[in-house]
Image (spheres, helix red, strand yellow):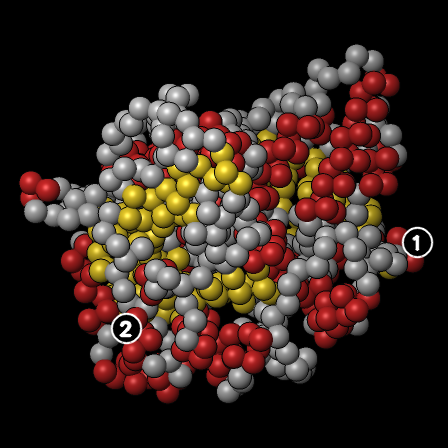
Amino acid sequence: MFRVVIRSRSRLIVIPQRTALSTRSLHRSLIVQKSYSATAEVIHPSPILNATSTSHGGSQVQQQRQPVVQRSKKDIIEYLYKNQQRPIPTGKPNTILTNCPHCLRVRKASFAATIDLATGAYKCRTCHSKGSWHQFTKALHKKLQDGPTNYQVYDTSSLLRSNNSNTTSRFSRSLEEIENYPEHVSTELKQYWLEQYKLDPSVLELYRVGVAEYANQNAFMNENEDAAAATMECITFPQTTLTYAVGEEELGKKDEFKVETVRVKACASDQPNNTVAFDPPTANEATSAGLFGYHTIPSDADTIILTRREMDAMAAHQATGLPSVSLPTANYQLQESILPLMERFSKVYLWLDDDVDGQMAAERFAHKLGEPRCLLVNTNVEGEKDGPRTPHEAFMQDKNLQHILQTARRLKHDEIMDFHDLREEVLREVMNPEQTCGVQSKDLPQLNEILKGHRPGELTILTGPTGAGKTTIISQLSLDYCTSGVPTLWGSFEILNKRLAKKMLYQLAGKDLSKAPREFDVWADKFEQLPLYFLKFFSSTAIRDVLKACSHAVYAYDVRHIILDNLQFMLSQQGRSNLDRWELQDDAVAELRKFATEQDVHITLVVHPRKDVGDALDINSVFGSAKVTQEADNVIIIQKGESQRYLDIKKNRFDGTLGTIPYEFETDALKIRGLTEQEQQRFKQEKNSSSSYIPMYRGSSFSKTRIIPKKF
Ligand SMILES: Nc1ncnc2c1ncn2[C@@H]1O[C@H](COP(=O)(O)OP(=O)(O)OP(=O)(O)O)[C@@H](O)[C@H]1O
């Protein structure tokens, strides 16, 4: 087991982590236009090889000569971290284990190259390749060239902070205090957790679960400032990572692997799945590169269980004895920065919730991690109506977790399946119709009555007259879904990202923050915690580039909702004549449709109406040819009535229900809200349109391809 230390740049002689991280954080945050390979600089660029013989995959390569160049340990470790290679200890001093640049990921135990830190020479126990440090970097450089490519994606922290402010998140508590959290777990609390959650005190200790007071930021979200001001006793779950610290001989400090706590998640002690706060409150590349339980994994482990929540990880470990970790947030996001931590395992059990969302996330994660080494676990193996959904629920119900693990399945080939493959998924949808409806809107429940929810894989067109509030409404709705855990990517081609972020920040706070500037930091911290990303593109951009960036966001951040505002600005100055432009637009919409289906993300596309139409729009008023609305699953029009604006749902492929939703606009919060009963009555009378508000069922747009939940 490794020694546990808390991240402290002053106390810990970390590998020049800052350098490594600043490069990695570039990938995520600002203006990243390079591929990974661009960072894979070869430390020793000399083309002359040294005298070490090299065999790749067993085939001998002729011996060549190369002058031996001294590489310090620090250089080697720095290079590995810079290129997303996270070494682990071997048991021998001065020797580390890392991913072999020649082994393909499909090979078992590809994390099998030992590097001698004194000479830089490497040797792989799987493919038997060996060579100098120069040959290692050259091979890795080549391998990374074929890797995924980064595109222009911002995260919220780069939008909310000015250039000269310090973007590094810091713990809100002293390191000593955080280190002492586990010691605050009283015998009574351990007993309570044993009785309540069946978790053994030794497991809590192993995972370094602690206790501390944290401010309830969720109460702040609900504008209950009194509750927010009070702190509450929380159970703390540390997220850890493994780093290699190069020692300082003159101070008598040796090199060693250390466990760093990068972030603490604080949850209600009586509701451990209810997150109260994160410390540091906002995640950056360093803080998001940790997993709950990572420090518990023995260095020779080649199997890992990845769960959604801390309780699941501990239950899985207690019941199976296998190393088990959980995701940094309860959102289904396996951030790119986490991937290097997972590289060393040749078998990964993806044990997420046994429901539609969880299993879809497991499939996505398997694509990211490499399908051959991933096994997907269904907790409810017996298919019971009220069977367990999570590992911890199964544990509480005294199910045999070892047996559940043995039933784990591999992902089949993407393009080929028969009904047998689909049977389980179909059953899950039949048994849980509400899950197929998608994420519910909290701000506009009337929208759920008509569209039933926000589902991945769909294309929604939003249109409305100039200045009617398209951006305002879709920013509010996207925020609404994002706060329910839907990772979201915004492409704002018409207004600057900082303006959009400001609007969304006001909407999150539910108030005009210029009137309460002291609250800025609280809401900005909350905002930064959302899984929300922004494309850096502005105005005319080729659809090809937009889709590449979207692909990257889906890969790197598990984005599930993409908003493109708006189609005309995105395609402006492309195509010479009107006909050209229509063709361009049709092609773009077809590409977006395909992308939504293939990547299983929801795309909301804002489209302007034709210029020649009056205020009352219909489905034919959308700019361009009929293809735009034909490709769409949902068409929503903002209508500017005489006295009342309303959403007009003109197409709903899910179950055909159509209808209108009148709303009020709250100027300070920049938000809309549905009308109260009374206001609705007034609206109906005024508009004499009592029938139009009642959701209508239109058989013609009924989808044959979807399973319609019974309750609808
Ligand atoms: N229902 C509403 N009532 C009054 N003002 C509104 C309403 N909705 C939005 N606004 C305000 O109208 C302005 C334009 O809103 P917004 O940018 O969302 O419209 P848009 O339809 O996206 O505009 P464009 O056609 O230029 O893309 C903003 O200042 C916004 O605060």
| Displayed quadrant of residue 699 | bottom right
What element does badge 2 sit on? helix
Q: Position of residue 328 (x, y in %)?
A: 42, 56
Q: Residue furthest top?
A: 576
**What amino acid type should be assigned to the residue bearing mark 2?**
Glu
**What amino acid type should be assigned to the residue bearing mark 1?**
Ser
Would you say residue 505 is visible in this rendering?
A: no
Q: Nearer the viewer, residue 653 or 78?
A: 78
**Left or right of residue 84: residue 165:** left
Q: Nearer the viewer, residue 457 or 104?
A: 104
Q: Earlier in the sequence, mark 2 or mark 1?
A: 2
Name the residue at 64% across, 67% down.
409
Q: Point out which mark residue 205 bears.
A: 2
Q: Position of residue 144 (x, y in %)?
A: 50, 35
Report the residue marked by disc 1: 700
Q: Nearer the viewer, mark 2 or mark 1?
A: 2
The correct choice, above or below, for 371 with respect to 580 in the image is: below
Q: Nearer the viewer, residue 692 or 263?
A: 263
Q: Position of residue 115 (x, y in %)?
A: 34, 44
Mark 1 crowd level (few <14, some 14–19, many ≥20, 10 Å Cα)? few
Name the residue at 33% across, 39% down.
121
- In what quadrant of the picture does the N terminus appear? bottom left
The Cα atoms of the two marked residues, 2 and 1, are separated by 60 Å
Name the residue at 46% across, 43% down.
129
Would you say residue 129 is visible in this rendering?
A: yes
Q: Do callouts 2 and 1 mark residues in contact (Cβ within 8 Å)?
A: no
Q: Position of residue 30 (x, y in %)?
A: 44, 30
Q: Residue furthest right?
A: 700
**Left or right of residue 521: residue 3:** left
**Left or right of residue 256: residue 495:** right
